[in-house]
Image (tube, rainbow, N blue to C red):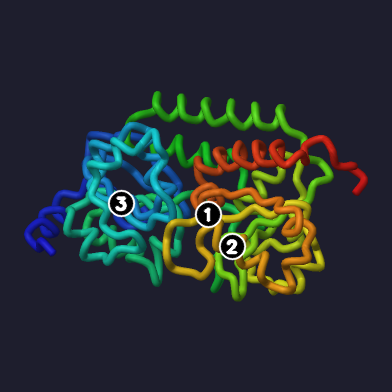
Amino acid sequence: MRKSGLLALAGAAALVLTSCATDDPDATAGPAVSPIENCGQEVTVDSVPERIVSLNQSSTEILLALGLADRMVGTATWTDPVLGEFADANAGIPRLADNAPSMESVLDVEPDFVTASFGSTLGEGGVATREQFHELGVGTYLSPADCVGKIADSGDGVREQPFTPDLLYREITELAQIFQVEEAGEELVADLQLRLDTAQEGVNATGVSAMYWFANSESPYLAGCCGAPGLISNTLGLRNVFDDTTQEWPQINWEVVAERDPDVIVLGDLTRRSQTAETGAAKIAYLESNPVTREMSAVRERRFIELTGAEMSPSLRTVYGVETVAAGLDELGLVGEQDPSN
């Protein structure tokens, strides 16, 4: 770790978090942008950050979509390859770790701002707490999707309110304000809104039931009602067979899954290696070989749709997920052929 760099960073912070520090009453210059309330912290930017580290893929891709690659000095915690349109820009940014990096490796690239998609990454038990970064003069931003209407628990959290596109648009808009690329933020939000509207107008899957399996074969993580898969379902008219739980990713045994017998199974096709049955192919092989699951109608009829892990997390990739599921339903012949009364 470069201690001289850290001392300089602490002495010349690019921004002040007013929840952690008191404003100078004698200061005459105002902040670069109005204060932003962010997951219990009030962020006031006094000068535009120039050295950004993104700790999660979802946050990284938003920053890339905003055209900020030249200010990014590190990324971490990836589940999938970066979106193709950002591959060239991302290639020049150091990847600090495929999963969660150490705090030392983050500080070694001397960031003045850190972003994250999940409190499990930017918080207790993660890379570091926001307060630890603030003490060194490093600003932080956490995705509103991981705190607004959501209660953290020992698992992936419980959602009191569903994840909505507005939370995604809020994250994009606030990051665009912090880095003073407001026009790019407006254009990105408009594009995502149009894509969601187009998908919703083009597909009506009312009456079709679905299950979303992220990872783990022994005790599978399946989507509850209200995270990113909930947005996909609500946009297209799908019914999630586990919409009776507000846990984001509850672990549910296969006997219960088989009893609910969804029409289609949406599978996470992950490239990481931290759970069992990460890839879509591994999940399908498991479902077809397990005596409990192989008799499910979706398994017998091979009604599978594969999504990237990033598409199953609250992010701009969720919009891509809506489009992927819409296309998959059409290809499987499920759109418009189900009786809405079922």
- For mark 1, what is the residue? 269
Judging depth in this view, the residue of 251 and 245 nearest the camera is 251
Which quarter of the image is occupied by the N terminus? bottom left
Residue count near mark 3 (Cα–Cα under 10 Å), binned few <14, some 14–19, many ≥20: many
Q: Residue at x 38, y 50 (%)?
A: 141
Looking at the rendering, which quadrant does residue 318 occupy? Answer: top right
Residue 331 left/right relative to 42? right
Q: Residue at x 34, y 43 (%)?
A: 44
Q: Earlier in the sequence, mark 2 or mark 1?
A: 1
Residue count near mark 1 (Cα–Cα under 10 Å), binned few <14, some 14–19, many ≥20: many
Q: Position of residue 185 (x, y in %)?
A: 43, 30
Q: CA distance from mark 1 to mark 3?
A: 21 Å
Q: Residue at x 76, y 71 (%)?
A: 256
Q: Amino acid at mark 2?
A: Lys
- For mark 2, what is the residue? 283
Judging depth in this view, the residue of 198 and 24 nearest the camera is 198
Q: Amino acid at mark 1?
A: Asp
Residue count near mark 2 (Cα–Cα under 10 Å), binned few <14, some 14–19, many ≥20: many
Looking at the rendering, which quadrant does residue 107 occupy? Answer: bottom left
Q: Amino acid at mark 3?
A: Thr
Q: CA distance from mark 3 to mark 2?
A: 28 Å
- For mark 3, what is the residue? 75
Q: Position of residue 306 (x, y in %)?
A: 59, 49
Looking at the rendering, which quadrant does residue 238 occupy? Answer: top right
